[in-house]
């Protein structure tokens, strides 16, 4: 089966610093990757996505990097704010049908 | 607001009972996915429907079933409930090639 994992289960950063959340995937055929943010009591919220024909994609304060050589995905959050505290999940799909999720990284922003 | 609506928000029921969880997709989304999330766990894929037809099955117990209706809303039926079925149940919907958009889930507590 698919395996999508995260390097660190928890991450604490100072407010204003940059955060980097990492994710490893095992299926080299995966062609679409997504980052989600889940706040307490809510469903996962789409943050940013990237397709396998790209290495980098930027959004507002967030950047996703894809390294297909080592099957690694990262989410960078610039100038982390208290509202960024949440659990972050990466997801991959290779068929456009089934999505496989990592176990999540809990980000805590220290004021 | 993702546009995906799940009802009810909370359910408390006894072991052995049966419950039905409902999901209304975003306008235009034909696929509905159901996920189970236990405490501090990742998202476990249960089942997917596309335009009324079952498309993929994950780790769904035989006591669980689902369907998608002609108006594209979906229901997840959980029967012979056990304590271990207590969890958050999310539905997510999408169009082909697009990210999943999640509802805010139904929190099921089995006592």
Image: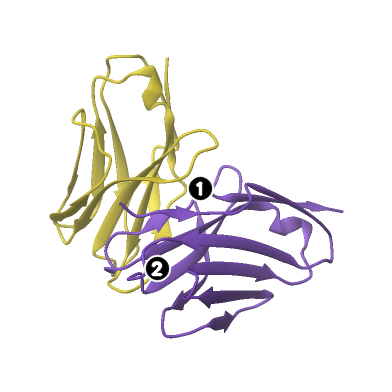
Q: Residue furthest front?
A: A70
Task: Read off the chain for label 2.
Answer: B
Please name the color used to draw chain A: purple
Quadrant of the rendering where the C terminus of chain A is positioned: bottom right
Quarter of the rendering containing residue B100: bottom left
Residue on which the image places disc 2: B99
Q: Position of residue A31 (x, y in %)?
A: 36, 74
Foreground pick, B9 / B51: B51
Callout 1: few (<14), some (14-19), or many (20+) C-alpha neighbours within 10 Å? many
- Left or right: B32 in relation to B83: left
Q: Position of residue A44 (x, y in %)?
A: 50, 54
Does label 2 lie on the same chain as label 1? Answer: no
Compute the Cα span from label 1 to label 2: 18 Å
Residue at 26%, 45% in the rendered image: B58
Please name the color used to draw chain B: yellow
Foreground pick, A77 / B106: A77
Callout 2: few (<14), some (14-19), or many (20+) C-alpha neighbours within 10 Å? many
Residue at 27%, 18% in the rendered image: B17
Total numbered labels: 2
Q: Is residue B61 visible?
A: yes
SS for tag 1? loop
Foreground pick, B40 / B68: B40
Q: Please, is residue B101 above or below residue B103 in the view?
A: below
Residue at 59%, 54% in the rendered image: A7
Quarter of the rendering containing residue A27: bottom left
Q: Position of residue B4 (x, y in %)?
A: 39, 56
Q: Please, is residue A40 above or below residue A71 in the view?
A: above
Name the mark on residue A103: 1
Q: Residue furthest bottom?
A: A53
Task: Read off the chain for label 1.
Answer: A
């Amino acid at each position: 089966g698919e395996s999508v994992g995260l390097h660190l289960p928890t991450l604490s950063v100072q407010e204003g610093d940059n955060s980097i959340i990492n994710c490893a995937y095992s299926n080299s055929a995966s062609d679409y990757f997504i980052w989600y943010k889940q706040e307490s009591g809510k469903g996962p919220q789409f943050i940013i996505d990237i397709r396998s024909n790209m290495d980098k994609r930027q959004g507002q304060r967030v950047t996703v990097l894809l390294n297909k050589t080592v099957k690694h995905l990262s989410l960078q959050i610039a100038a982390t704010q208290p509202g960024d505290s949440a659990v972050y999940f990466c997801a991959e799909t290779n068929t456009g049908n089934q999505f496989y999720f990592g176990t999540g990284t809990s980000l805590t922003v220290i004021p | 607001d993702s546009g995906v609506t799940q009802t009810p928000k909370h359910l408390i029921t006894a072991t052995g009972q049966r419950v039905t969880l409902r999901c209304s997709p975003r306008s235009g989304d034909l696929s509905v996915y159901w996920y189970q999330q236990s405490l501090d766990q990742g998202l476990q894929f249960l089942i997917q429907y596309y335009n009324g037809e079952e498309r993929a099955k994950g780790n769904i117990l035989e006591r669980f079933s689902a369907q998608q209706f002609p108006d594209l809303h979906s229901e997840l039926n959980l029967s012979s409930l056990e304590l271990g079925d207590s969890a958050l149940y999310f539905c997510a919907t999408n169009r082909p090639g697009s990210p999943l958009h999640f509802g805010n889930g139904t929190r099921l507590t089995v006592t």
